[in-house]
Image (tube, rainbow, N blue to C red):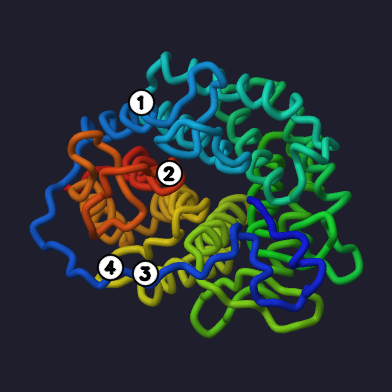
Amino acid sequence: MKPMLNILLVTLSLAAASCSKPYHQPPPQQTIPVKTDTAKFTLADANTAYSAFNKYFYNSSAKLYYGSTGSNTLGAIWTQAIYWDLAMDVYQRTNDTAQMRMITNIYAGAVNQYDNYNWSNASDWFIYDDMMWWITALARANQLTGNATYLQHAVAGFDHVWAGSYDPVKGGMFWDFQHSGKNACINYPTVIAAVRLYQITKDTSYLSKAKAIYAWAKANLVNPANGEIADHKIGDGAPGYQDYTYNQGTAIGAGVMLYKVTNDATYLADAKSYADYTENSMCHSGILPEEGDFNEQGVMKSIFAQYIMMLINDGGQKQYLPWIQQNVNTGWQNRDHVRNLTYRAYNIPCPTGILQSYESSSIVTFMQVCPPSN
């Protein structure tokens, strides 16, 4: 995620110190009424959507994804980890051996593009949360495949980020190398990565770290009255509240994962409150906010998709499923019917011109992890 580091270093107190880059205020949510006769997507549609996403965005030579249908440059480093998660989602849904090759290929592309996961390379890796998105994906890939190399990279990356990002005095994780602030986009993914590494290795130090970071985040980044997740906290200042679905999503995922490994129902209750806020306060007529103005924020709902479905499935909270299915059905109905590409604003027709992979990714992801409605 690309920071405006010069601005941050000059004025650290600015509320714009969000880890969502570039720092654009998301445009207002479209108020076009949601159609009530929305066609329901099918599993065949899920295949179609993923095939189209790869047709228009996947660079088979680099084995990574372009930033847009213009096919000029590769997408941002952190978003490639989200697309790798998507590849794993497809494999888990289909059990297709060809899709396992896709998982292997994306990993190989990242090895080549990002200095073989050399976490000390400050040119490729220049922000801690960029690393942590990959670390969580690497740990998941190990869980899925048993590939020990994925685990080695995840462990090395986690240790590197912990050493540079964790604040041993006041707690929490800094999001950038200059320690300008502590953001949700590093703290909650750290919890998720730590729990995954605990599940794999049974090393209780990871669980202790997960609990500690979650406790700090709950005390500093959560509005306890309604479950809203703050985007960041700078120094001892008040939390900077700016609603983003990926922050709500990773907070949900952190809560569910800690609930599963501890059986402490408090974590599950937290996750439900974060989901309730997203549904009741961030949506319009049930539809998730569009997020992003032709920038990387378009990928945020892809992250949210992973963790709201974790709450539904692993947390046993099926009451959220119709809401998610409404979003998927709406977004898919409003796709570009020629290219079968989807858009970040679910309740309006997908533009027919240049599209970013970021803004086209979330409905595709939802379709892999969310079952079709009957």
Q: Earlier in the sequence, mark 2 or mark 3?
A: 3
Q: CA distance from mark 3 to mark 4?
A: 7 Å
Where residue 51 sits: x, y (%)? 32, 27
User: Decide: marks 3, 4 in contact (CB < 8 A)?
Assistant: yes
Tag 1 and tag 2, C-beta contact below 8 Å: no
Q: CA distance from mark 2 to mark 3?
A: 26 Å
Which residue has dot 3 on it?
A: 279
Check the image and report above or below for 190 versus 341: below
Q: State which tag comes first along the sequence, 1 or 4.
A: 1
Residue type at mark 4?
Gly
Q: Nearer the viewer, mark 2 or mark 4?
A: 2
Provide the residue designation for mark 2.
356
Give the Cα distance between marks 1 and 3: 32 Å
* Among the 4 quarters of the image, the one containing residue 218: bottom right
Residue at 55%, 38% in the rendered image: 75
- Left/right of residue 45 with respect to residue 356 in the rendered view: left
Q: Residue at x 42, y 30 (%)?
A: 92
Residue 179 placed where, x, y %? 83, 62
Residue identifier under label 4? 286
* C-alpha distance separating marks 2 and 4: 24 Å
Nearest to the eye among marks 2 and 3: give it: 2
The residue tagged 1 is 55
Q: How many numbered dots are placed on residues in this image?
A: 4
Q: Is residue 60 above or below residue 161?
A: above
Looking at marks 1 and 2 on the same chain, the residue that comes earlier in the sequence is marked by 1
Give amino acid for label 1: Lys
CA gap, disc 1 and disc 4 = 30 Å
**Residue found 75% across the figure and 83% down from its top:** 237
**Residue 304 appears in view:** no
Within-10-Å neighbours for mark 1: few <14, some 14–19, many 20+: some
What is the secondary structure assignment of the residue under circle 1? helix
